[in-house]
Amino acid sequence: MNKGKSMITKILIAGLLLCLLPASLYAGICSVVDAGTYIEAEHYNNSGNNFGTMSSATGGYSGSGYLPATSNDTNFPPSGTPLEYLLYFPTAGSYYLHVKGNSNDSNSDDSIWYGISGSPVGGIDFPRDNNWNWSNVRLSEGPNPPAINIPASGLYAVNFWAREDGFKFDAFTMSTAAAFPGGGTSIDPRDPLGVCTTPAGVADHDFDGDGFTEQSLPTADCNDSDPSIFPGQTELCGNAEDDNCDGQVDENCSTVVISDGGLIAQVPLTLVNPAKPQIMLNMSNDHQLFMAAYSDYDDYDGDQVPDKTYIHAVKYFGYFDPDKCYDYDTLDDRFEPASLTNDRYCSGNWSGNFLNWATMARIDTVRKILYGGYRSTDTPTLTVLERSYIPNDMHSWVKFYNGSDLPKLTPFNKPVTERTASSAATVTIS
């Protein structure tokens, strides 16, 4: 039997079983109450990949905590795997949604997508006041007020997708009446007490219509809300999904083993993978990359005042580890790590933090980010990073620092008195 016929057969069998089961069997079966049903966000059956783990960092939530959104997807329909709540609906019709959430007082963290059985329906918008609010304000898609349509009684998956990261999802209610039902009857689709047992024939429903269910044999559907994922599906390289439900991700994709045990593509990813590139580097390649990474007119500590010199509270990025002390090896002409430091001070040695501020060019920080820095020596036993060549012209720079902590940043002591010029003396510059 082919996949399409198998799917139709299973749906017909499931529908027949639903018709044969008496209504009394559904009492206490995680059933939605038409007058109003209340469900905590953390009581999901499938976590998907749009929300993080339950958090309690922001007070005022109900239940055990809330789910923080971790992705941005403002285009409709949204992508990714949604949250899933398996619920039995006793009657067909429209069930109106109210969602409790917190927008974090942000114009960009104030909405959520919802849907049914893996299909997005619409979005819900929230006030931007950094408070927990119940909302059924239609965002841009779906019915007004927000609702899901149930074509016939049975078990369905209610879904939520993150629309903007930073949004906090706390709970939702459903009711056949458009007005907010208040608290409603609270149910837990996870069935922690064993009182929400789903009858045979209903639990094995194919929610995404791909012909496989969460109880299929010999291999179950590992994502029953995505019709493109099922046992026997062709594995798609580069999408970080187990497309064929064999417990592996991106197996048998074109890779070659390199010496450090990692994997690297043999050819450009865009030539062998169907996924579109997700990152574009748009960098300047002009001469300004060879100027000082840390200028004397930027505000690095955020106090609205330009930092004209070294600020010890700032952790400067570069080839040197800010939390290490360095000695200068005059034989090999290089700085070498000497010890760790808890406060970035190094009495008698060079502070790595101070060296980053004093010596790094912009191109050095770019190289450090992209591939760890320019390696003049790279063997199994020794790696030496070399700063870029700086011409003796407008690209070169001078750093000035006369703080009292100079002896803790360099191996030099600060002079007791500094040499100055006066009317009775002359200074010759040669």
Image (cartoon, grey):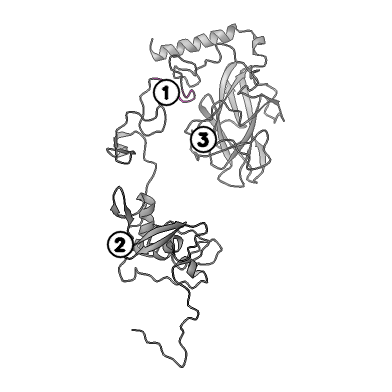
For the residues labelled 2 and 1, say whether their Cβ atoms are less than 8 Å apart: no
The amino acid on which the numbered mark 2 sits, given as a three-letter code, is: Asp
Sequence-earlier tag: 2 or 1: 1
Q: Nearer the viewer, residue 335 or 168?
A: 335
- Label 3 residue SS: loop
On whether residue 354 falls in the magenta region, the answer is no
Furthest toward the bottom, the residue is: 424
How far, Cα to Cα, is label 3 from label 1?
20 Å
Residue 408 x, y percent position in the rendering: 49, 66
Residue 138 vertical placement versus 177 (above, below): below
Pointer 3 local density, CA inside 10 Å: few below 14, some 14–19, many at least 20? many
Q: Nearer the viewer, residue 142 or 254?
A: 254
* Left or right of residue 124, residue 258 in this image: left
On whether residue 229 falls in the magenta region, the answer is yes
Query: Which dot, 2 or 3, sits closer to the camera?
Result: 2
Query: Residue at left 71%, top 29%?
Result: 181
Q: Residue at label 2?
A: 332
Q: Residue at label 1?
A: 245
- Label 2 residue SS: loop
For the residues labelled 3 and 1, say whether their Cβ atoms are less than 8 Å apart: no
The amino acid on which the numbered mark 3 sits, given as a three-letter code, is: Asn
Sequence-earlier tag: 2 or 3: 3
Q: Is residue 106 visible?
A: yes
Image: magenta residue range: 222-231
Q: Residue at label 3?
A: 50
Please identify the quarter of the rendering in which residue 97 is found: top right
- Label 1 residue SS: loop
Quarter occupied by the C terminus: bottom left
Residue 301 vertical placement versus 239 (above, below): below
Query: Residue at left 35%, top 57%?
Result: 284
